[in-house]
Amino acid sequence: MAEKPQPFQVLYCGVCGLPAEYCEFGPDFEKCKPWLIQNAPDLYPDLVKEAGSKEADKVSDQLSSTSISDAGSSKPKEEVKRLPGGKIKKKEKPEIIIEKMTRNKRKCITTVKGLELFGVKLNDASKKLGKKFATGASVVKGPTEKEQIDVQGDIFYDIVDFITETWPDVPENAIYFIEDGKKVPAV
């Protein structure tokens, strides 16, 4: 006689409640990782390697911070932000980009991006720009999901003087134009 098949034992995650094989597709995989490393290391060998390398990095950081340095030549290290996949995120250089777009072959919109990087409130800036140039100005979200100021009309070259006079914290060499798809310094 043939043996009776036995039921398959399924290991369920203690954090999200999904089967351990499907945790990576669940809502909180980052929270599940420590549990998976401890309880199911054979399912995710990459996590075990990653955890081992993180521990090695922590130990090397501790050793480097406690090492004897040269007399008084300790330099503060820059914080580097790492994205998923190990890519390094570059620090955003504070700059203002002014771009002129034409619509309906006659009307222009001047776009100002990056004013918030210099501590300028965009709502106040749009009001000041609208009053100065007697046009409509509004704060909108651009294609990169960052806020920018759209000003109706062609104020492409006049706006640089206005920005440097109104906000003295903004250096003139940090203002760029986009002409023909190329970034050109405004100075």
Image: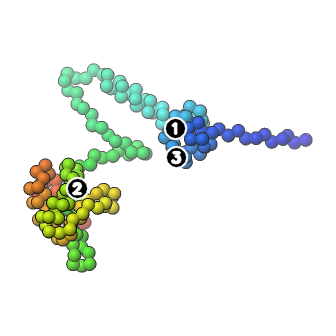
Pick the residue in front: 150 or 83.
150
- Residue name at image x 60 percent, y 41 percent: 17
Q: Earlier in the sequence, mark 1 or mark 3?
A: 3
Q: CA distance from mark 2 to mark 1?
A: 41 Å
Q: CA distance from mark 1 to mark 3?
A: 12 Å
Mark 2 sits on what residue?
122
Q: Viewer-proximal residue, 66 or 35?
A: 35
Q: CA distance from mark 3 to mark 2?
A: 35 Å
- Which mark, by number, is residue 33? 1
Q: Relative to 133, does residue 25 appear above or below in the rendering?
A: above
* Quadrant of residue 113 within the rendered picture: bottom left
Q: Secondary structure at mark 3?
A: loop
In the image, residue 27 lies at what x, y percent? 52, 46
Q: Residue 87 lies in what quarter of the image? A: top left
* Whole-percent x, y for residue 24 in the image: 54, 45
Q: Are marks 3 and 2 in contact (CB under 8 Å)?
A: no
Picture disc at residue 27: 3
Say which amino acid is labelled 1.
Lys
Mark yes or no: residue 171 visible: no
Q: Secondary structure at mark 1?
A: helix
Q: Is residue 94 left or right of residue 133?
A: right
Q: Against 97, is 109 above or below?
A: below
8 horizontally vs 109: left or right = right
Q: Quadrant of the N terminus?
A: top right
Identity of the residue drawn at 59% across and 36% down: 14
Tag 1–tag 3 contact (CB < 8 Å)? no
Crowding at label 1, few (<14), some or many (≥20) Cα neighbours within 10 Å?
many
Identify the image quadrant of residue 155: bottom left
* Residue 121 appears in view: yes
Indicate the amino acid at tag 3. Answer: Pro
